[in-house]
Image (cartoon, helix red, strand yellow):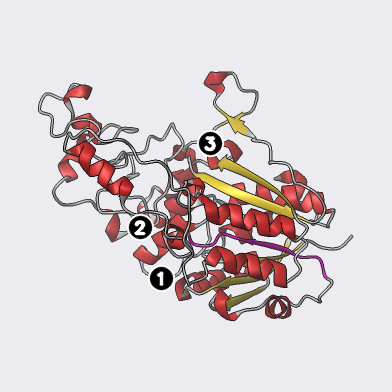
């Protein structure tokens, strides 16, 4: 039985690629243009295997990918990756003439205004999107299957034409596709994190991976959700102290008062605070958001502001190994760079356990060898 060879595009710190390894696949090549991410991948080569290629996908071809991965033209191949979502709003299509922003301003000013309809037309941009480049490399490398991952906002009316164009291109090339949304907490990740996946295969449609975890209070016959307390308990002592974890400044005292599992609403009349600072729904939900050790974490942010949570229940910022644990990276996984770069890499990653479930589903359907690990995912 042939091996499940994997090439990871836009690899970042390696969450999706490492998930492929956990699922029993052979990760042959990881590609990214970010130097810190590539250093992280190289620092964990004993876990990933394969090669690390620092480069821009615009300068690569499918033939080059196979060569760098040590694969022949007819070797089975699964390409995985999540193109950055930044260009979705305008790089390929100019979809927003400003109507939504005008609507929000009018509502805030108390003026009656009708909500604009979603755009019904697109105007192509001269530039290609990274999503299109991802598809180009899948096609040029003659991959047997692919997994495309991204944020849920790609389904927004502004961005959905790009997703639909990817699906049309894949199906026109002979791939059967399956699109689904997943919440990482339903697959054993101690974090509520929504992501979407497009699975494509020449061997038929892959089924969505079945959730393994659920809320016991709802009578679901699954394992209970993993929670933040046990996930990060190993990093509580001072050996893991980071100077940046200390919270100082304008709202530090407010953060101290907030109960685990709460946010700024603790300081509102709605919550019964005797001296409220804010009204409800006047701040983003993750403002002064504090973890509860008895609940799953909320989504880990790649570029949090100084008062954006989740914070630790002891009123400090989370340490980078704690952030990594909430993304289900191994305890000794090494992230390179200053703290800001480490946090960015961790926050941008696909949770490893979620990735393993998705990759295993495709690998089984392809009928390739996965080192016997798939059953343990």
Image location of residue 239, percent across then percent down: 38, 57
Which circle marks residue 269 in the picture? Answer: none
Determine crowd level at label 3: few under 14, some 14-19, many 20+ residues with C-alpha closer than 10 A. Answer: many
The answer to whether residue 196 is left or right of residue 312 is right
Compared with residue 234, is residue 165 higher up or lower down, i.e. above or below?
Answer: below
Q: CA distance from mark 1 to mark 2?
A: 15 Å
- Residue at (81, 65) in percent of width and height: 76
Q: Is residue 151 magenta?
A: no
Residue 54 in view of the camera: no
- Report the magenta stretch's main SS: loop
- Residue at (51, 69) in percent of width and height: 40
Determine crowd level at label 1: few under 14, some 14-19, many 20+ residues with C-alpha closer than 10 A. Answer: some
Image location of residue 6, percent across then percent down: 71, 64
Question: Which residue is labeled 1 in the image?
Answer: 337
Q: Are circles 3 and 2 on residues that touch, CB within 8 Å?
A: no
Which circle marks residue 226 in the picture? Answer: 3
User: Between disc 1 and disc 2, whose residue precedes?
Assistant: 2
Q: Where does the magenta region start and end?
A: 75-84
């Amino acid at each position: 039985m042939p091996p499940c060879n994997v090439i990871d595009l836009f690899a970042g710190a390696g969450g999706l690629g490492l998930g492929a390894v956990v699922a029993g696949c052979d990760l042959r090549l990881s590609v990214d243009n970010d130097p810190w991410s590539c250093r992280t991948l190289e620092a964990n080569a004993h876990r990933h295997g394969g090669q690390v290629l620092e480069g821009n996908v615009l300068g690569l071809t499918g033939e080059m990918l196979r060569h760098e991965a040590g694969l022949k033209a007819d070797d089975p191949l699964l390409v995985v990756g999540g193109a950055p979502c930044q260009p979705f709003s305008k790089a390929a299509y100019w979809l927003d003439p400003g109507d939504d922003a005008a609507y929000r301003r009018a509502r805030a000013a108390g003026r009656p205004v009708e909500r604009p309809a979603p755009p019904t037309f697109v105007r192509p941009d001269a530039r290609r999107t990274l999503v299109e480049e991802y598809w180009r490399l899948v096609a040029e490398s003659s991959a047997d299957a692919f997994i495309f991952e991204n944020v849920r906002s790609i389904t927004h009316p502004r961005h959905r034409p790009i997703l639909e164009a990817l699906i049309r291109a894949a199906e026109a090339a002979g791939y059967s596709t399956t699109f689904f949304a997943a919440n990482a907490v339903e697959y054993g990740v101690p974090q509520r994190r929504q992501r979407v996946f497009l699975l494509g295969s020449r061997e038929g449609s892959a089924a969505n991976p079945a959730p393994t975890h659920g809320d016991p209070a709802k009578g679901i016959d699954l394992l209970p959700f993993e929670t933040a307390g046990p996930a990060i308990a190993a990093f509580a002592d001072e050996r893991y102290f980071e100077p940046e974890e200390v919270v100082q400044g304008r709202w530090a005292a407010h953060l101290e008062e907030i109960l685990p599992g709460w946010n700024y609403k603790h300081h509102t009349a709605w919550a019964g605070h005797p001296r409220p600072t804010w009204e409800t729904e006047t701040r983003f939900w993750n403002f002064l958001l504090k973890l509860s050790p008895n609940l799953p974490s909320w989504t880990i942010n790649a570029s949090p502001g100084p008062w954006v949570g989740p914070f630790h229940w002891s009123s400090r910022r989370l340490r980078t190994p704690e952030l990594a644990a909430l993304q289900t990276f191994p305890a000794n996984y090494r992230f390179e760079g200053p703290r800001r770069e480490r946090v960015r890499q961790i926050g941008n990653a696909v949770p490893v356990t979620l990735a393993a479930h998705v990759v295993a589903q495709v690998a089984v359907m392809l009928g390739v060898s996965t080192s016997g690990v798939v059953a343990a995912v």
